[in-house]
């Protein structure tokens, strides 16, 4: 049997086909091309699925199930995207519409951050573990918590919003309306903001040269400059990693997962990111004296986590 997953994003619709060993054997991508009506986007999702199965050399009849990872909030029972701002989706019955086009019964829907966590849980570092969580440091902070094979989603499906837990009371304004959220300090967006502020206060910083201007700063800028010895960049990176470690320590204290994976573009920093975080968490987490410690790792699936996880949503209890 085969599994098909769709990662629906504001920029691309990507479909992938997995074999029984959860290896991706075919994929296809179509531009989301916003703004467009939901109906057109759903039709293109179905097209991407058909293309991906063709690229994999698989018949749609041999596909066990299809999973969809979407931004925004979802109702899994009715297969409805309740709200997704970047897609202009409001109460879109995406699963029913896909069923009508593809004539497949088993179609599952999940929030994209939870889907990525499911991917890493079944096909990455979470494989064979009982409890697992993933935090994605991207434009925002997404995440998912899986305990004994079950996704923790809360009574109304809106749980697991790890990024919107406050780490600085009355701190930076967050997109969710609160101030001081983990996301407002430890997302890639937050790192870029912190980097720009530091550059403004230090016209001699190497970050100016490395980035090539304030509007060209990205998540790599402070890490690259810190690596070349720039003291202001070092301070930016150090403080940023403290924020990341603070949020992760909170998560570990609450959930005590066997493995916690960090995903997102910042992970390209590898050990420059991972080692200091591990060090800080090992000093601060409540269970630091226990024999067994949460293993913190960098996500092994990269950008494919969302597609792989969507394809394996059928496995979730
Ligand atoms: Zn927030």
Image (cartoon, rainbow, N blue to C red):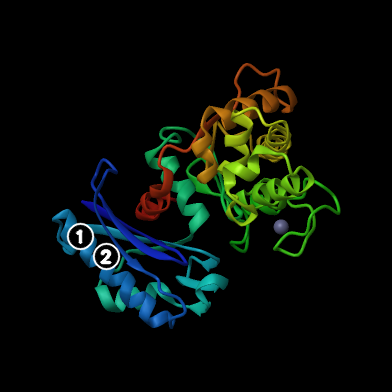
| Residue for point 42% across, 48% down | 303
Question: How many angstroms separate mark 1 from mark 2 (CA)?
Answer: 6 Å
Q: Residues within 10 Å of mark 1 (few under 14, many from 20)?
A: many
- Give residue 155's position: percent from left, percent from top: 63, 60
Callout 2: SS? helix
Front residue of 237 and 292: 237
State whether label 2 is within 8 Å of ligand 1. no
Q: Quadrant of ligand 1?
A: bottom right
SS for tag 1? helix
Left or right? Give the position of 56 relative to 106: left
| Crowd tier of the residue under label 2, counting other residues whose Cα lies within 10 Å: few below 14, some 14–19, many 20 or above | many
Q: Which mark is residue 49?
A: 2
Residue 71 drawn at (x, y percent): 51, 64
The residue drawn where x is 42% and y is 52% is: 306
Above or below, 8 against 263 in this view is: below
Q: Is residue 195 above or below residue 74?
A: above
In the figure, 137 relative to 126: above or below?
below
Which residue is at 74% across, 26% downward? 284
Q: Quadrant of residue 38?
A: bottom left
Residue 194 or 207: which is nearer the viewer?
A: 207
Residue linked to disc 1: 53
Instruction: Tell me which residue sits at (45%, 36%) in the image.
Output: 126
In the image, residue 51 lies at what x, y percent? 21, 64
The spot of residue 220 in percent (x, y) is 56, 42
Circles 1, 2 touching at the beta carbon (< 8 Å): yes
Most distant residue in the right direction = 170
Residue in front for this viewpoint, 307 or 10? 10
């Amino acid at each position: 049997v085969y599994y098909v997953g769709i990662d629906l994003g504001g920029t691309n619709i990507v479909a992938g086909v997995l074999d029984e060993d959860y290896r991706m054997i075919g994929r296809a991508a179509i531009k989301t091309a916003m703004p467009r009506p939901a109906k057109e986007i759903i039709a293109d999702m179905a097209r991407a699925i058909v293309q991906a199965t063709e690229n994999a050399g698989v018949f749609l009849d041999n596909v066990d199930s299809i999973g969809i990872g979407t931004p925004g909030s979802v109702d899994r029972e009715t297969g409805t995207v309740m709200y997704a701002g970047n897609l202009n989706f409001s109460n879109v019955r995406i699963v029913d519409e896909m069923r009508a086009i593809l004539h497949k019964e088993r179609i599952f829907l999940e929030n994209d951050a939870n889907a990525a966590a499911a991917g890493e849980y079944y096909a990455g570092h979470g494989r064979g573990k009982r409890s697992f969580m993933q935090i994605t440091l991207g434009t925002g902070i997404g995440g998912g918590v899986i305990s004994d094979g079950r996704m923790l989603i809360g009574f109304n499906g809106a749980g697991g919003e790890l990024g919107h837990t406050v780490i600085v009371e009355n701190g930076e304004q967050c997109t969710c309306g609160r101030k001081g959220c983990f996301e407002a300090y430890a997302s890639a967006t937050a790192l870029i903001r912190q980097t720009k502020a530091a550059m403004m206060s230090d016209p001699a910083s190497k970050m100016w040269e490395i980035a090539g201007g304030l509007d060209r700063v990205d998540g790599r800028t402070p890490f690259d400059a810190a690596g070349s010895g720039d003291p202001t960049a070092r301070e930016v990176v150090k403080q940023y990693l403290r924020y990341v470690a603070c949020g992760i320590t909170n998560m570990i204290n609450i959930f005590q997962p066997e493995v916690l994976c960090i995903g997102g573009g910042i992970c390209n920093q590898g050990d420059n990111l991972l080692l200091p975080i591990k060090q800080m968490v090992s000093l601060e987490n409540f269970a630091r004296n226990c024999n067994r410690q949460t293993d913190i790792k960098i996500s092994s699936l990269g950008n494919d986590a969302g597609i792989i996880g969507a394809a394996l949503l059928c496995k979730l209890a």
